[in-house]
Amino acid sequence: MHVQISVIIIAKNEEDNLRRSLPKLSWCEDIIVVDDNSTDNTVAVAELFGAKVYGRTFDGYGPQKKFGISKARFDWILNIDADEVLTDALIDELRKLDLESGGFSGFEIPVRHVFMGKVFRHGKESRFYHLRLFNRHNGDFNSATVHEKVEVDGKTGRLSNVILHYSYKDLDHYFYKFNIYTSVGARNLKAKGKSRSLLLCLAAFPFYFVKHFFVYGNILNGRPGFIWSYLNAWYHTVKYLKLYELNRKS
C-alpha cells in the first residue's frame, strides 16, 4: 500500500542539518519546512531537496508546529527535528505501515542520541519513545511554547526502528548550547524559589557523573559515553553555580 505522509520540520539556520536529514525523506511527497527568518542557506537547501518552505516568526514550538500541520497535504503527519535523521530500517518500516486500516491514531518512535560520531544504544537520552507519527484528525500539538507534545485520541503503536538525533555538531556547538541552557536552567530554578549552597553546587559534579555514567548506563557507550557523562556532570554543576550567583545578587 502506498503510504502518504506529510513531514513537518521547523528550522532556523539549519542548512547543515537539513543536508543530512532531507535526503532520507526523498520518499515523502510532502515535506513542510517552517522557517524562522534564517540568515544562512536553510531555505535554499530545503527547496533543493523538494521541501515547501513557509516563513513564520517563531512564537513557540507548539504554535510553530501547528502552523506546519495546517500546510500539510496529507492526514498522517511525521514530525522530526532538523537535526534528526531517519535510519534506512525505519524508512522501510514506515513505508510498509498500514495506516488506513490498522486502527491506530499514532505511533511512537525510538530516538537514539548521537554524540562524537557514536550512536548511543544505552543511556538516558536513548531510552525514550516519542510520538512522532500521527493522524491529524485524531491528534495535534498542544500550544505550549516549550516542551510541546502531541496529544491524540485513540490507540497508539510503537515502531521498532530508530531516529538518530545529532544534537551537537562538535564540542564548540555543545558549549555554545551549554552556556545558554545552564543560564536558562538557573533562571527557571530561581523563579521557583530554589537555592543551593556553594558546597552543594560543588558536590553536584561527582553525584551527576556517577548517575550518568553508571546508573544511566553510559559506561556501555564507550569513550564518548564517558565524555558525555563528564560534560553532563559539569552542566549540572555550572547550572547550580549560576543559580548560586543569581541568589547572591538578589
Image (spheres, grey):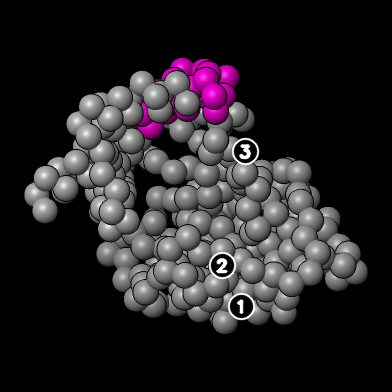
Can you identify the residue that label 2 sits on? 8
Are there few (<14), some (14-19), or many (20+) residues within 10 Å of tag 1? some
Mark before the other along the chain sequence, 3 or 1:
1
Q: Any mark on residue 88, and which?
A: none
Mark before the other along the chain sequence, 2 or 1:
2
- Callouts 2 and 1 close, C-beta under 8 Å: yes
Asked if 205 appears above or below 131 in the picture, the reply is: above
**Image depth: mark 3 or mark 2 in front:** 3
Q: Secondary structure at mark 2?
A: strand
Span shown in magenta:
212-233
Q: Label 3 sits on what residue type?
A: Arg
Can you identify the residue that label 3 sits on? 127
Q: Main secondary structure of the magenta part?
A: helix
Using the image as rendered, state which of residue 181 and residue 177 is in the foreground: 181
Are there few (<14), some (14-19), or many (20+) residues within 10 Å of tag 2? many
Residue at point 54% right, 24% down?
215
**Image depth: mark 3 or mark 1 in front:** 3
Please provide percent x and percent y for residue 184: 28, 52
Can you identify the residue that label 1 sits on? 72
Residue at point 76% right, 49% down?
159
Q: Secondary structure at mark 3?
A: loop
- Is 131 magenta? The answer is no
Split into 4 quadrants, where in the image is the N terminus?
Answer: bottom right
Using the image as rendered, state which of residue 109 and residue 185 is in the foreground: 185
Mark 2 and mark 1: Cα distance apart in space: 8 Å
Residue at point 58% right, 76% down?
69
- Is 224 magenta? The answer is yes
